[in-house]
Structure formats: C-alpha cells, structure tokens
Image (cartoon, rainbow, N blue to C red):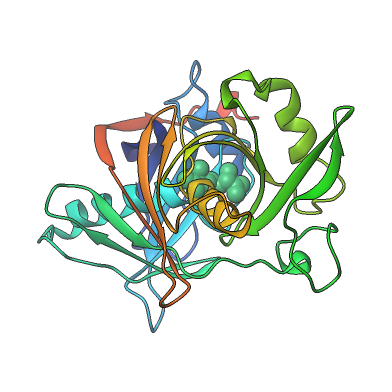
Amino acid sequence: MVIEFSKYQGLGNDFILIDNRYNSEPIITPEQAIKMCDRHFGIGGDGVIFVLPGTAKTDYTMRIYNSDGSEPEMCGNGIRCLAKFIAKLAGNSTPNQSYKIHTLAGVIVPQLETNGEVTVDMGEPELIATKIPTTLGTTEGKVIAQPLEVGERTWLVTAVSMGNPHCITFVEDSEAIALEQIGPLFEHHSAFPQRTNTEFIQVVKPNYVKMRVWERGAGITLACGTGACAAVVAGVLNNVCDRCCTVELPGGCLQINWSAADNRVYMTGSATEVFTGKYLHNHQLSI
Ligand code: ZDP
C-alpha cells in the first residue's frame, strides 16, 4: 500500500500532511502514524495531519495524531501548514483566502497572508480549571501562578486551554531548564488528567518572550503554536506580557495577539512545504 503525503514545517514543528478529503475517517491508523513519524525508520515528523471533508458549517475538518499516536484536539503550527496544503490541493491560494476548519477544539479559521505567512483565529482561551482540565485551583476558578510540585521543586504554574491543555511557568532563564528530565514529569502529573503540554517562558520584555516547550505526546519540539498562544494569555494574566507579543521559539518567532475586543487569540507565523513523497507500508513490519 502506498500513501501519498506532503511534508510541511512551521518554525521547525514538522508534520506529514495527508489528503483525506474523500474519507470521513483518517486513512491511516495511529500505529501507522507512529511509524511514519519515526525519524530513522519512517518519514520523520512531530505528527500526522489529515484534511477531511468539512461539516455543514465548515469547509474542511482537521484531525491530527501526535508522534506517539495520541490524538490532540488542536495544533496551532499544524493548522497553518494545513491551510497551505489546502491552498495547494484546491488550487486557490489567493491572498487573504481563509478556510473554516472543523477541529476537536471547535471551528478554527486560518487566513493566508500575502507574504506567505498564515494568521489563525485560534478562538477564545479556556481558563476554567475543570475544563482545561486540571485539578489545580478552585473548582470553577482559574489557575494563575498556583504552586505545583514537580521533580522535587515547587513551580508557580498557570494553566490555559487553547483547545488542548497547557501548563505555563515563567522562569529567569528558559535555556537553563532541563526540559528532557522535567517535561515528562509535568506531562504525566496527576494534576492534569488528560496530560499536558508544558511551556517555560522567559520574559525579555512585555512584548517579547522566549519559550521552550515539552509537548504532550511529542516531547521536545522546535515550536508549538497553541503553546505560544497559551503563553501570552498566561503572561497577560500574570501581568508580565502585553496582549500583542512576539514569542521566540527554538524554530523561530510567532506573533500573538490576544484581542481585548473579542477575547480571541490571533497567531501569525510561517508554514512551508518541504517535500512530497510516497510512503510504502510494509505490513510485515507493522507493530
Ligand atoms: O496537545 C497536544 O497533544 C500537542 N502535542 C498537539 C500539537 C500542538 C502543536 N505543537 C501546536 O503547534 O499547537 C502542533
């Protein structure tokens, strides 16, 4: 069996994109996605993204598998890549073209910019603890700078959902964090029943922060779009960031704007096609 794919990256967060417009379910399984994402035995990627048919109110549906086969609700860098992929498939890359995308986190609207970047209306952040979900904070309250013990240290964490859960900590020096060790402890902490993405943020100035991320289901990645949005929301809630803020990730910068007017988060950044190919499934080797 041969699967045609396109490989995209947004700030080095890289994805295998699959044209799934003629099936209502993803044409590959989570187990196959794990193999395709493997950087030595497969194509390599932080996840596999499918373009499926839309619903009555949307143009298309996005589904995504993380590189561990789990399925997140949303993916900020991925949906920028998806917009570029759709423009190629549908042959309509007119500037300012936008698409209504159905996701497990609701309707998300990416728009193509004239300079090749993509701006995404990421919707409103969810701050209520039980909906993130986290057991931190008061039952119906927000989780802002709450103490959390992880790895024999107490961190002051802020929890935000951008459709998927994020746990944000502000630190003096993001480079100094031993992400490989501490990341999995946050991801699997019992305070986060659906596990969590984890971001460490160094505020350089109110409109410029540096971020390192440990992603749920994917580990250290070069960038995380939903994470950058969640970080700026957390920064505003902690009075350390402006609503308009540049987030510098290891893979590059994202512009984030948490609009005071409509409470929605807008994210702008690049997304690039890298190569296309045909993936050969060897069923004898399947896990
Ligand atoms: O929530 C999760 O399980 C994430 N690993 C999903 C992917 C998020 C992503 N990095 C982003 O840019 O938002 C793709």
Say whether residue 252 is left or right of residue 215. Answer: left
Measured as percent of width and height from the top left, residue 164 is found at 61, 56
Instruction: Give the residue furthest to the bottom.
Output: 56
Quarter in which the C terminus is drawn: top right
Residue 27 drawn at (x, y percent): 46, 51
Q: Nearer the viewer, residue 88 or 106?
A: 106
Q: Residue 226 at what x, y percent from top left?
A: 50, 51
Q: How many marks?
A: 0
> What residue is shown at x 46% (from left), y 36% (from top)?
223
Q: Viewer-proximal residue, 257 or 16? A: 257
Query: On the picture, is 248 further left or further right than 278?
Result: right
Residue extending furthest top? Answer: 40
Q: Residue at x 40, y 77 (%)?
A: 261
Q: Quadrant of residue 174?
A: top right
Write the residue at 29% across / 57% down. 119
Depth check: 142 or 242 in front? 242
The image quarter containing residue 160 is bottom right
Left or right of residue 68: residue 138 = right
The N terminus sits in image quarter? top left
Instruction: Say if 77 sits above or below 140 in the image.
Output: above
Relative side of 238 to 6, left or right: right
Q: Nearer the viewer, residue 43 or 188?
A: 188
x and y, in percent, of residue 35 in the image:
54, 29
| On screen, residue 83 above or below 189 | below
Asked whether residue 272 is in view, the answer is yes
Residue 1 shows up from this direction: no
Q: Relative to residue 72, is residue 200 depicted above or below?
A: above
